[in-house]
Amino acid sequence: MAAAVYALKDFIADVDRIARDEPSAHAVAERVSPLLTRLIARPESVPAEFRRRPEGGKRGRYMLHRAPHFNVVSVIWGPGETAPAHNHETWGVIGVIENEIEETRYKVQEGVAGGRATLDVTRVMRHRPGAVSCLVPGDEVHRMHNPTARDTVEIHVYGKDLVGLPRKTWEPDGREKPLVSPKYLNC
């Protein structure tokens, strides 16, 4: 007998249950991580139109599920594309469907260097298809970079809607700037 296919709707139902029942951001990320691993094992679980960049566009960002206590987003990074160091203000779980991404994590010390933050690199990871990365309060500032000549496709799950959420980004010299994520391409 064939194993049941784990579809996007199954993943959303499971994350919904976990996000409603679990008060700890660390526990939510820990419990969602293996489910995302299971989902991204089948790239076709995400419709094809949400696994490619828009015609002539850089990054593709598509909302797959929006709810008050979590969102599921498809993100497509163009070749060489980078997002500078930034925070999330929530838990998150990110899984690579296609190609690879380089993630650099930071510990931020605010206002240490003449009023500027110091960003200490805590680790640099190269995630390939099937890899999952968890973001939790205290360990959720990172930089993302597609070091390849191909698109990278990821699924991001966040405990809050990032559109309009006041966040921060940092220049390499520690200058802090406000970050407000743009709208998704499909909503």
Image (cartoon, helix red, strand yellow):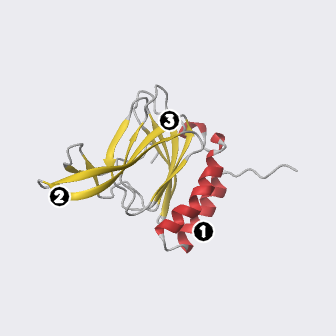
Comparing labels 3 and 1, the label whose residue is closer to the camera: 3
Q: CA distance from mark 2 to mark 1?
A: 40 Å
Binning the other alpha carbons within 10 Å of mark 1 as few (below 14), some (14 to 19) or many (20 upward) gives few
Q: Secondary structure at mark 2?
A: strand
> In the rendered image, is residue 57 in sight?
yes
Q: Please tell me whether residue 7 is drawn above or below residue 144 in the rendered image.
A: below
Q: Position of residue 117 (x, y in %)?
A: 21, 54
CB atoms of marks 3 and 2 within 8 Å? no
- The residue at 60%/58% (across/down) is 12
Q: Which label sits on residue 17? A: 1
Q: Nearer the viewer, mark 3 or mark 2?
A: 2
Left or right of 149? Residue 170 is left
Amino acid type assigned to the residue bearing label 1 in the image: Arg
**Three-letter amino acid code at disc 2?**
Gly
Q: Which residue is mark 3?
A: 152
Residue at point 78%, 52% (across, down): 4
Residue 179 makes an appearance in the image: no
Q: Residues within 10 Å of mark 3 (few under 14, many from 20)?
A: many
- Distance CA(mark 3)–CA(mark 1): 29 Å
Name the one closer to the observer, 67 or 14: 14
Q: Position of residue 62 (x, y in %)?
A: 48, 45
Precedes in sequence: disc 3 or disc 1? 1
The first of marks 3 and 2 along the sequence is 2
Q: Which residue is mark 2?
A: 111
